[in-house]
Image (cartoon, rainbow, N blue to C red):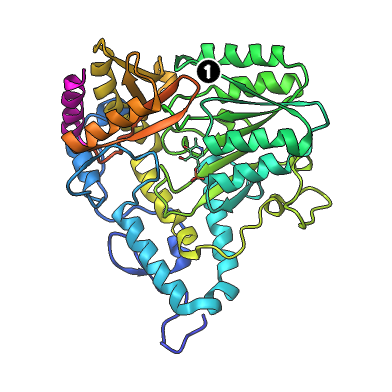
Amino acid sequence: MIKLKTGISRRTLITGMASGTIMSVANALNARTPSGFPRPPADISDSSLSKDEDYWNNIASYYDSTAGIINLEHGYWGKMARTVQEFYLSATKMVNTQNSYYARKDYTEDHKSCVRRVANALGAEEDEIVLTRNATEAIHNLIRQYRGLDDGDTVLYADIDYPSFKTTMSWLKSARNVNAVQIELPVQADQSELLKKYISAFDANPKLKLILLTHVSNQHGMIVPVKAITAEARARGIDVICDSAQSWGLIDFKIKDIDVDWAGFNLHKWIGAPLGVGALYMRRGSLHKIAPYPGEDDPENKDASARVHTATSNFAAILSIPAALDFHENIGASVKEARLNYLRSLWTTEADKMSNIEVLGGTDESSRTGMASFRKVDKNSVKDAQLLQQTLENKFGIFTVVRKGLASGGCVRVTPQIFNTPAQIEKFVSALKTLN
Ligand SMILES: Cc1ncc(COP(=O)(O)O)c(C=O)c1O
């Protein structure tokens, strides 16, 4: 191993996770458990563990807490667990110290290991994953580089989709001379109602070639039945781009559970990686339908990485992916989903009983996540939602966010994280009770 002038091997510069020991980049890339990580009682169900406050207090101790506000807006990005943060800071120091010597000589191999780790976690093949700066980079490239459109074809998206992706789909109108159709989905729905909506949109648009599906909506956390809609689309020759920016880590799934050809993911939301890490998934055999990034070459359509040109990026953030996945997987994706759903249920169950409050999102457990939205009945303007958000923040010290993308108007989104407590949700419910 090459020794640097400091006498320290350049591959032994990263400080270990909770233990604080020195470990190599290579070792850091293997799955591991921080020392002292809480172990749940054996044979406990996800549902019981989701309500075990001793366990979650222990998990919460791995996060720095926000002072002065109850933060219920964790849909923006995920706070790193301290073990991940420490790793990231050490990786930043190492990258900054070693500079191009590390980046030019060792980074390529380390990057490959990180891609492998993401592929394993998603149940994908290594060559199907490309790391990006965020989900937006992945989805924008898929939409812009989609090759399957002819003049007069139709593309389709829904009001619950991510605002920037709706505008990119709509941009195809002028860029490709196609029709762009937006459908409106119910603000409260279950899986079969959502599937029916898409099927009738397919029936109404015979020239449909491409749809955007959002696995979990950023408006109200509703789960869209991506696999069932995609099967129906595939049978009709319609291609699907799936936005999984908000879903990975919020709910527990693998690629086979959505069964799409193309998807964009974030690791800086619910996986808990540092900001600036996303991923593009492209199923083997599907690359001919998405052009390489302008100027890139892939004559055999076998190189997914030719679909993105990220260039110089935050090496330390990417190197921290395994640490983030370790933390996530040590808790367990299904346990995390159960905890987030439990925290959401603590307020939605109460809000459902309030005649002046409308809770938006899924109506059955398979359509619900830890994220949901609400508004006052008959008060659905964006201004109304802004007033609600401000009241919660200024009067009750509870931070939430306004969403404005639904065809039916504005709402306030509420998104607890695993370290939020039932007592904090209880304070939010008390605040809700005073709104009239
Ligand atoms: C459903 C959905 N799609 C896309 C995005 C964009 O994510 P990013 O800005 O990390 O690319 C978000 C972010 O909140 C989202 O919730």
Return the x and y of residue 180 as percentages of the image width and height. Answer: 69, 27
**Residue at the location (39% across, 48% down)?**
272
Main secondary structure found in the magenta portion: helix
View extreme (front): residue: 383
**Residue at the location (27% across, 62% down)?**
19
Looking at the picture, does residue 185 appear above or below residue 30? above
Tell me if residue 388 can be seen.
Answer: yes
Q: Which residues are magenta?
A: 421-436
Tell me if residue 45 can be seen.
Answer: no
View extreme (bottom): residue: 5
Return the x and y of residue 43 as percentages of the image width and height. Answer: 29, 30
Quickly name the residue at label 1: 185
Looking at the picture, does residue 404 appear above or below residue 308? above
Return the x and y of residue 342 as percentages of the image width and height. Answer: 29, 26
- Amino acid at the residue labelled 1: Leu
**Label 1 SS:** loop
Camera-nearest residue between 136 and 235: 136
Q: In the figure, is residue 348 to the left or right of 396? A: right
Q: In the figure, is residue 159 to the left or right of 71? A: right
In the rendered image, residue 293 lying in the magenta stretch gets the answer no
Return the x and y of residue 56 as percentages of the image width and height. Answer: 22, 39
Q: In the figure, is residue 430 to the left or right of 114? A: left
Looking at the picture, does residue 164 appear above or below residue 7? above
Q: Quadrant of the C terminus?
A: top left
Count of numbered circles in the view: 1
Quadrant position of residue 374: top left
Looking at the picture, does residue 166 appear above or below residue 110? above
